[in-house]
Image (spheres, rainbow, N blue to C red):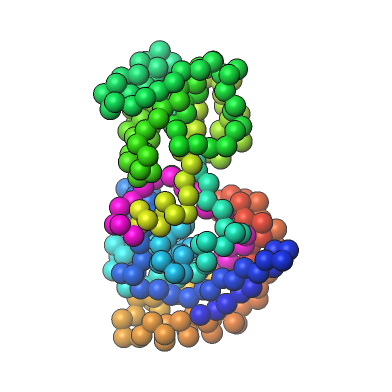
């Protein structure tokens, strides 16, 4: 394994880059079919895995990279390049994605919310937006902001079941909207005064993520948003190495370690757009 250390004040954060057997890894979110098939096609044309997936070293739960791992498994790869982290480090944050439904029929959305609550026996509270703390901490409720009203839905205490309700609400409201966006809190809340419905999703914890994944279940897509202090990119591991079944895992990791040792490591500031937006404080680029 190729090991890197990152200093954040008094805290030292380590990451280990190598390969892991796909059969030993656990997903914690569902994949989206069209996104998965897009990656399958991309891997068929590519010669490299550009970025490692992020995995909790102890539990083997995938934190980021569900679609890449699933695409490689579908293509028959026995292994995938990973970045192992200590998930319960204080330096790793787990946040949630808010939903923004654009171009909605407000009256039909309000009726749908009330119908769903009645059908599922859910308790909901209706507030005026002036009585609601928009930027307060996330809670165990599903909060839907519809113009000048907020519908606070109390669902099951079990986080997996609660997010099934989120998924059902999403699909229903999406059918009454032109489009849906998944955004961090600050960006999502900027849509409140526009022709949109904003959904503030329930708080999610690291314990929730691990327990659900190890039970063999998965949360809906776009449940979690993981931010690690530093992320390695462009490791460019040859796919033919990850596909070889005649090599042991240790042999594959020795090869990956030699490949990375030959590259130049560049540390840059994060919170930038590359192939997507990276929220991490810093990025390690292998060139």
- Residue 35 appears anywhere in the view: yes
Q: Quadrant of residue 136?
A: top right
Residue 169, position as x, y percentages in the image: 36, 30
Determine the residue located farthest toward the top in the rendered image: 107
Q: Residue drawn 61% across and 78% down?
A: 263
Determine the residue located farthest toward the right in the rendered image: 9
Q: Is residue 258 above or below residue 218?
A: below
Please say whether residue 233 is one of the residues in the magenta stretch.
yes
Q: Residue drawn 40% across and 79% down?
A: 241
Q: Which residues are magenta?
A: 214-234
Q: Quadrant of residue 184?
A: top right
Q: Is residue 202 above or below residue 264?
A: above
Q: Residue drawn 57% across and 23% down?
A: 132
Front residue of 266 and 87: 87
Q: Is residue 39 left or right of residue 266?
A: left
Q: Quadrant of residue 8?
A: bottom right
Residue 214, position as x, y percentages in the image: 34, 60
Q: Quadrant of the C terminus?
A: bottom right
Front residue of 74 and 193: 193
Residue 201, position as x, y percentages in the image: 46, 36
How many labels, in total? Answer: 0
Front residue of 113 and 82: 113
Q: Is residue 281 left or right of residue 34?
A: right
Please say whether residue 272 is one of the residues in the magenta stretch.
no
- Residue 34 appears anywhere in the view: no
Q: Is residue 93 above or below residue 61?
A: above
Q: Is residue 219 above or below residue 67?
A: above
Q: Residue drawn 37% across and 51% down?
A: 29
Residue 115, position as x, y percentages in the image: 30, 19
């Amino acid at each position: 394994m190729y090991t890197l250390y990152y200093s954040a004040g008094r805290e030292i954060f380590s990451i280990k880059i190598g390969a892991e057997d796909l059969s030993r890894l656990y997903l914690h979110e569902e994949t989206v079919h069209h996104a998965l098939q897009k990656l399958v096609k991309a891997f068929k044309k590519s010669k490299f895995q550009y970025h490692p997936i992020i995995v909790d070293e102890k539990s083997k739960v995938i934190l980021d990279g569900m679609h890449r791992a699933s695409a490689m498994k579908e293509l028959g790869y026995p292994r995938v390049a990973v970045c192992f982290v200590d998930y319960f480090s204080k330096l790793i944050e787990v946040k949630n994605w808010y939903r923004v439904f654009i171009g909605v029929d407000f009256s039909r959305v309000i009726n749908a919310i009330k119908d769903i609550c009645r059908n599922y026996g859910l308790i909901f509270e209706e507030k005026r937006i002036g009585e609601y703390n928009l930027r307060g901490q996330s809670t165990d409720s599903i909060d839907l902001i519809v113009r000048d009203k907020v519908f606070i839905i109390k669902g099951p205490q079990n986080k997996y079941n609660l997010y099934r309700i989120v998924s059902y609400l999403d699909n229903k409201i999406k059918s009454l909207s032109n489009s849906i966006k998944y955004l961090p809190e600050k960006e999502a809340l900027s849509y409140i005064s526009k022709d949109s419905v904003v959904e503030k999703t329930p708080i999610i914890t690291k314990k929730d993520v691990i327990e659900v994944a190890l039970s063999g279940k998965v949360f809906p897509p776009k449940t979690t948003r993981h931010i690690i202090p530093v992320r390695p990119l462009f490791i460019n591991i040859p796919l033919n190495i990850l596909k070889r079944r005649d090599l042991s895992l240790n042999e594959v990791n020795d090869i990956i370690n030699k490949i990375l040792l030959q590259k130049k490591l560049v540390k840059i500031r994060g919170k930038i757009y590359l192939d997507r937006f990276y929220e991490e404080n810093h990025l390690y680029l292998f060139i």
